[in-house]
Image (tube, rainbow, N blue to C red):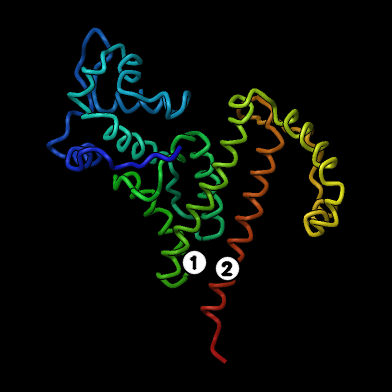
Amino acid sequence: MVVFAGQGDARRSMDLLWRTEGAPPSQGGPGPRPALSVDAIVAAAVAIADTQGMAALSMRAVGERLGRTAMALYTYVPGKSELLDVMYDAVHAELPDPAGSGDWREDLTAWAGSALDFYVRHPWVLQISQARPVLGPHEYAALDTLVRLLYGTGLDPHVVRRLTGTLFHFVRGAAQTVADARRAAAATGRSDEEWWTDRAGLLAEVAPDFEDRFPHVSRLESESSPEPYQDRVTDTDAGEHVPYLEREARRTFTTGLGVLLDGIAAAGAARTAPAR
């Protein structure tokens, strides 16, 4: 499901995003119950989206999480559309802002890895289309950080502009694969192992001439076969096993990022090479 941001009242969304004088207070006052505020509402909304997905997000659900009615929220946030803008921007504050090591490749590698973890932590962010940015301060700060790191490559500003989009698309795409791999079993009721076991055998049956029809795919499989599907590794942070598909997605991310950075290095070297 693709969600487009920026569908609410433009003035009220921008006031909330940038905390102008016209915005409701970010922090609420003391009281017997948790005080309502823009920040409290956004935090509750993010928690719902993180744990239950975008489909579960509503003003009523946020109100219930805070022990209030949906109507009580409207003093602070005009509606769900404006709330979505603010929560999207708020979580972008988590994206890294490295001080810089002086090595652009090291810095970009660290940024990309942290950004991947950010998107996997908040998979609902991946459902929000990049066609309509929310134009919030944290979104701009994340963009500013990546542009700064890319300027360290010494490439032409026009190239830096395009590489900014390339890296964001690359990281988001990898994160989408990881997020989908994590959701697949719960959404379908079948584990990855069961799904592949069923279909791998049938593929050999329905396409006995597979190797002749798809020689290059077959060659790649024979020359670079991954570990057995049942082989798993442990995510030490989560204390859980990481499914094969997620592990492969992360390895693909690492390899692809390395090749992409090799290309950036080659472009930089070509730009600074003396003319013949």
Q: Quadrant of residue 160?
A: bottom left
Residue 254 screen position, x and y as percent: 64, 50
- Please name the amino acid that badge 2 sits on: Ala
Residue 72 placed where, x, y %?
21, 17
In this rendering, position of residue 72 left or right of residue 207: left
Q: Earlier in the sequence, mark 2 or mark 1?
A: 1
Q: Secondary structure at mark 1?
A: loop
Q: Which residue is mark 2?
A: 265
Question: Looking at the image, which residue sits at the far left?
Answer: 22
User: Which residue is pictured at 41% across the width and 41% down the height?
Assistant: 128
Three-letter amino acid code of the residue under disc 1 = Thr
**Could you tell me how many numbered marks the image carries?**
2
Of the pair 223 and 17, the residue shown nearer to us: 223
Q: Could you say whether the residue bearing mark 2 is in a helix, strand or loop?
A: helix
Q: Quadrant of residue 178?
A: top right
Where is residue 91 drawn, in percent x and y? 39, 36
Badge 2 crowding class, 10 Å Cα cut-off, few under 14, some 14 to 19, many 20 or more, is some
Relative to 61, residue 80 above or below = below
Q: Which residue appears at 24% of the width and 7% of the height?
A: 32
Pick whichever, 245 or 103, lies toward us: 245
Q: Residue furthest bottom?
A: 276
CB contact under 8 Å: marks 2 and 1? yes
Whole-percent x, y for residue 126 in the image = 46, 41
The disc placed on residue 237 is: none
Q: Give whichever of 30, 254 is nearer the camera.
A: 254
- Crowd band around label 1 with a 10 angstrom C-alpha radius: few (<14), some (14–19), many (20+): some
Q: Quadrant of residue 151?
A: bottom left
Q: Residue at x 27, y 13 (%)?
A: 68
The residue that mark 1 highlights is 153
- Identify which residue is drawn at 51% across, 47% down: 172
| Furthest residue in direction front, as rendered | 206
Question: Is 271 placed left or right of 128 in the picture?
Answer: right
